[in-house]
Image: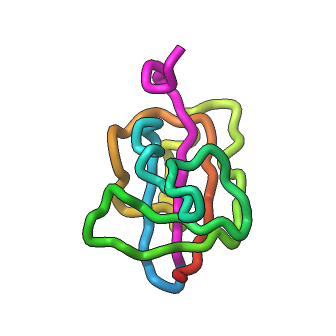
Amino acid sequence: MKLKDIPYFVKFIFSCDDCEDCFSITDSEMLKFVIDESSREPIHELKIGQVLQFELIDENPKKYKVIDIIIRHLFDDTDSHKYGLDSQDCTSSQGENKEWLFSLLIKLELQ
């Protein structure tokens, strides 16, 4: 089964505190625009120290280094994700907004 056909996905939040850039993704199709700088290919893994670029935003030639990865929102009910404000999430997301099972907060540092 293709990921795009699954109604639920993981929420990826790529957040850069020192540059105030934020990319929030619940649509698996949008991951093809998150590029590993060393291979120039879409990501297939995330690790501390990895350098990323976001090809979707043409005006953003910036490079970001992954400095931390945090697994969050491990609830037994996906409705729990709908309540309250997440201060570490973006104000808008890229791609289709889908229900999500948990979130990964990927903290970035501008290179």
Query: Does 105 appear above or below 77?
Result: below
Query: Does 10 appear above or below 87?
Result: above
Residue at 62%, 44% (x, y): give it: 44
Q: Where residue 6 sits: x, y (%)?
A: 49, 21
Q: What's the coloring here? A: rainbow
Q: Where residue 11 sits: x, y (%)?
A: 53, 45
Locate the C terminus by quadrant.
bottom right
**Viewed as shown, does residue 64 lie left or right of 29?**
right
Q: Quadrant of residue 97?
A: top left
The boundaries of the magenta stretch are 1-16
Q: Quadrant of residue 61?
A: bottom left
**Viewed as shown, does residue 11 lie left or right of 69?**
left
| In front of the other: 38 or 21 | 38
Q: Is residue 13 magenta?
A: yes
Residue at 52%, 68% (x, y): give it: 15
Query: Does 71 appear above or below 3?
Result: below
Furthest residue toward left: 59
Furthest residue toward front: 39
Residue at 71%, 70% (x, y): give it: 49
Residue at 53%, 14% (x, y): give it: 1
Q: Is residue 61 magenta?
A: no
Q: Total label count?
A: 0
| In front of the other: 102 or 85 | 102
**Viewed as shown, does residue 3 lie left or right of 50?**
left
| In front of the other: 101 or 108 | 108
Q: Where residue 70 sits: x, y (%)?
A: 71, 58
Furthest residue toward top: 1
| In front of the other: 59 or 9 | 59
